[in-house]
Amino acid sequence: MRKKFIAGNWKMNTTLDEAVALAKDVVKTMGDTSDVDIAICPPYTSLYAVSEVLKGSTVKLGAQDVHWEAKGAFTGKVSCAMLKSVGVTYVIIGHSEQRTYFHETNETVNKKVKATLAAGLLPIICVGETLEERKSGKMDAVIESHTVGAFAGISAEDALKCTIAYEPVWAIGTGETATPQQANEAHIYIRKLLTKLYGTSTAEQIRIQYGGSMKADNAKALLGQSDVDGGLIGGASLKASDFAGIVKPV
């Protein structure tokens, strides 16, 4: 039985003070919840302060991205070692917004996954299609390209340390949501791809989150599906009570 995993992606929201206040609210609201894995992913500027708030709680710290190089002349980028030094456990890699706005590719995702794993951090790897790709019948091909590309050269042992987040890009920030059945079908397809790569045993252990506008009012139905193992939550993670509304139905 795969343990559910809910991660909040705060994106480019919250100042330092706001991030600390929100983290405190999340810790208080979650209490000693341990039957679900929980993480929050603030902006880089708040990682250390939030890590101090999370100490002693069941909530883990995640970062929204990372660079694959260890150090050097990469202005504006942050390395795995930098993230580890401020208490990060998880790293979101290949988010649709990185692909859309900042030239992320399957190759750069793969480099980041390898660097993250080598550093002892845990990747949350995003895959998913746009509305245009879905309408033109390219959904399966896109998901396969993202998944196979991300895991190129990754051992089965390391694959087990990864979480996949399925993002139907057309359902992010649009108010649209895939039906529970649509979401589950995509998750089942991803698991079939993982089975081809690593075999049934490994594929059955890898968690696949849903990352398309999950909220308290649809979380139970989505999380009740056979292959939906959690959620990568955007807007609904910016208020502790809303985030708890997703975690608690689990």
Image: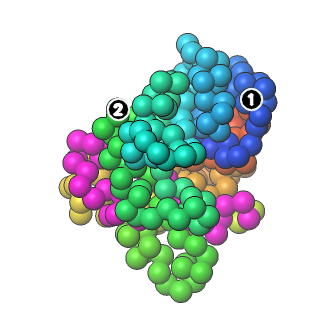
Question: Label 1 sits on what residue type?
Answer: Leu
Residue located beneath label 1 in the image? 16
Q: What residue is drawn where x is 30% and y is 38%?
A: 118
**Dot 1 alpha-carbon crowd within 10 angstroms: few under 14, some 14 to 19, many 20 or more:** some
Q: Left or right? Give the position of 77 relative to 123.
A: right
Earlier-in-chain disc, 1 versus 2? 1
Residue 76: quadrant of the picture: top right
Vertical order, 214 against 238 (above or below): below
Where is residue 176 drawn, in percent x and y?
71, 66
**Residue located farthest toward the front when viewing the structure as drawn:** 73
Q: Nearer the viewer, residue 21 or 46?
A: 46
Residue located beneath label 2 in the image? 120
- Say which element carries label 1: helix
> Which segment is the magenta one?
146-174
- Say which element carries label 2: loop
Q: Nearer the viewer, residue 229 or 133?
A: 133
Question: Could you tell me which quadrant the C terminus lies in?
Answer: top right
Vertical order, 36 against 101 (above or below): above
Q: What residue is drawn where x is 74% and y is 29%?
A: 16
Where is residue 3 drawn, in percent x and y?
43, 36
Whether residue 215 is in magenta: the answer is: no
Vertical order, 227 against 188 (above or below): above
